[in-house]
Image (spheres, rainbow, N blue to C red):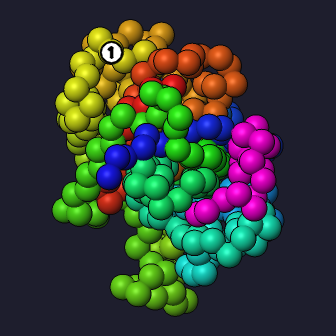
Amino acid sequence: MKLRRAKIISTGSYIPEKVVTNADLEKMVETSDEWISTRTGIKKRHIARDDEAASDLAYMASVRALEKGGISPDELDMIIVATITPDMLFPATACILQDRLGARKIPAFDLEAACSGFLYGLSVANQFISTGVYRTILVVAAEALSKIIDWEDRNTCVIFADGAGAAIVKASDDDSGIISCYLGADGSGANLVGVPAGGSRMPASVETVKQRQHYMKMKGNELFKRAIKIMVQAVDRTLKMGNLTYEDLDFFIPHQANIRIIQAVTKRINLPMEKVYINLHECGNMSAASIAVALDQALDEGKINKGDKVLLTSFGGGLTWASIIMEW
Ligand code: COA
């Protein structure tokens, strides 16, 4: 069977209106604009309204991607929502989105791979498209992280933010499309970032709420040490799979966790910073949504041209990591 290449034909994104600046955070926890800017690169972030959940963000991003691609919801064959902040434990946010978009009774499911969720989602879509099983797949990454952040914990509240990005994936009729996908995980690092309570291990109780166990806990420094090494390894594996070298790359969209991580990875893979897209100064770390939003913004800004080889690489909770190279 001849495999077809899958390609992203359009993207969309949605960032909530409300902005929280570093100066705002100085009033909430013991921190400073100087600390946040130099340690993370983040200057501000966007936060969802009280009545906005992940599916609302996902819906806005999806509508924009559908419109830009001239695709009607009827044409979709599958919906994948990558999120660690679903509307609720179940049903899946993807099912809520399917109904709201007015799509057919197509498969719809959530995929949880933290910051690597969008790339895991693209990779799943790639499999269904390249084998000819489906023609048109919507991959959305939507995060309302502000809802699981402890706004009294300066380790996390200065970093995370809300947003959603969507991509329509279809079979390619030329050489453009996904060249290689590499996914990985290491559950031995599962304790480094996560929400302890609310699942079957530690069900919700008055005690868990009192102990703030429903909020995200993170060992940032431990993650930092692993992120650079793992992301560089992931890039190398993806290049090798695609028979490519660093010199072949035209544009790099890394996960937006920390400017120091991005700079270190970019240096190790020998790319100039001009080839790297950065939005974390304005958008913070939106977990799965970071790369999805950045891709949409980079395309809107005309930073990616036809024929460019674009590298997307992520690292996050799980631990999970992923890297994709596509020809635009
Ligand atoms: N403001 C001021 N001080 C802060 C702070 C804040 N918001 N957050 C932490 N600090 C303090 C710490 O308490 C610590 O103080 P101490 O030395 O007195 O104990 C000091 O700053 C250094 O903390 P540390 O955690 O070592 O800082 P860091 O340089 O590692 O930066 C992160 C912290 C979170 C920015 C960084 O580790 C990071 O980006 N990690 C990766 C995150 C990531 O990839 N997550 C994956 C899921 S997306």
Give the image location of residue 2, x and y in percent.
34, 46
Label 1: few (<14), some or many (≥20) within 10 Å?
few
Q: Residue at x 28, y 63 (%)?
A: 190
Q: Amino acid at mark 1?
A: Asp
Position of 232 with respect to 310 (left or right) is: left
Residue at the spot of label 1: 248
In the foreground, 162 or 30 = 162
Observer able to see residue 236: no
Q: Secondary structure at mark 1?
A: helix
Look at the image and say whether residue 63 sits in the magenta stretch: yes
User: What is the magenta range?
Assistant: 61-78
Residue 297 higher or lower than 263, as above or below: below
Give the image location of residue 125, x and y in percent.
48, 54
Position of 257 with respect to 192 (left or right) is: right
**Quarter of the rendering containing residue 209:** bottom right
Q: Residue at x 49, y 81 (%)?
A: 198
Give the image location of residue 135, x and y in percent.
57, 54
Q: Residue at x 52, y 90 (%)?
A: 205
Give the image location of residue 222, x and y in percent.
25, 47
